[in-house]
Image: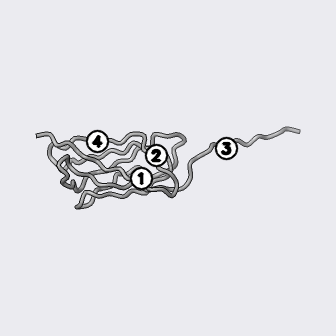
């Protein structure tokens, strides 16, 4: 008789929220910035890898599967805005992480 072993990978489950405000270094809110989450942990939970826009007040809120991410703020509608990323952002089931971005603006 043959024995069969079933091995399952331990995957994070559930969703968490990442929210915050994107401003320039003087504190002025930056609307319409594209917030792009990229999963850096393995195994990767399934998700729609799309960006999310900041509101007119520079705020954003994103619900994501529990995992580790790099979150990048791209403010292409603001001339001179630099790309800024938050690395190793851990999203946990049922928890909210607050990540504010201060974007340098080049002249």
Q: Where in the figure is residue 32, as x and y percent of width and height?
A: 24, 55
Q: Where in the figure is residue 8, as x and y percent of width and height?
A: 67, 44
C-beta proximity under 8 Å, tags 4 and 1: no
Q: Residue drawn 42% across and 52% down? A: 97
Give the residue number, with chain letter if any, for mark 3.
8
Q: Which mark is residue 27?
A: none
Tell me the mark number nearer the camera, choosing from 3 and 1.
1
Q: Nearer the viewer, residue 81 or 52?
A: 81
Could you tell me which secondary element the residue under label 3 belongs to? loop
Res 54 quadrant in image: bottom left
Distance from disc 4 to disc 1, alpha carbons, whole Å, reads 17 Å
Give the residue number, with chain letter if any, for mark 2.
90
C-beta proximity under 8 Å, tags 3 and 4: no
C-beta proximity under 8 Å, tags 1 and 2: yes
Could you tell me which secondary element the residue under label 2 belongs to? strand
Q: Residue drawn 56% across and 48% down? A: 12
Q: Residue drawn 21% across and 47% down? A: 76
Q: Which mark sits nearer the N-terminus, 2 or 4?
A: 4
Q: Which mark is residue 97?
A: 1
Tell me the mark number nearer the camera, choosing from 3 and 4.
4
Work out which residue is located at the far left of the displayed protein and give it.
107
Q: How busy is the neighbourhood of tag 2: few (under 14 within 10 Å), some, or many (20 plus)?
A: some
Tell me the mark number nearer the camera, choosing from 4 and 1.
1
Q: Residue drawn 26% across and 41% down? A: 83
Q: Which mark sits nearer the N-terminus, 3 or 1?
A: 3
Distance from disc 3 to disc 2, alpha carbons, whole Å, reads 22 Å
Give the residue number, with chain letter if any, for mark 4.
84
Q: Is residue 37 left or right of residue 46?
A: left
Q: Which mark sits nearer the N-terminus, 3 or 2?
A: 3
Work out which residue is located at the far right of the displayed protein and give it.
1
Could you tell me which secondary element the residue under label 1 belongs to? strand
């Amino acid at each position: 008789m043959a024995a069969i072993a079933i091995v399952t990978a331990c995957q994070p489950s559930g969703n968490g929220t990442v929210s915050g405000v994107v401003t320039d270094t003087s504190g002025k809110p930056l609307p319409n910035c594209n917030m792009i989450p990229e999963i850096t942990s393995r195994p990767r939970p399934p998700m729609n890898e799309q960006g999310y826009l900041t509101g007119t007040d520079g705020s954003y809120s994103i619900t994501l599967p529990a995992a580790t991410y790099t979150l990048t703020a791209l403010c292409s509608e603001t001339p001179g805005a630099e790309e800024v990323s938050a690395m190793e952002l851990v999203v946990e089931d049922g928890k909210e992480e607050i990540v504010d971005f201060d974007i340098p603006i080049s002249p």
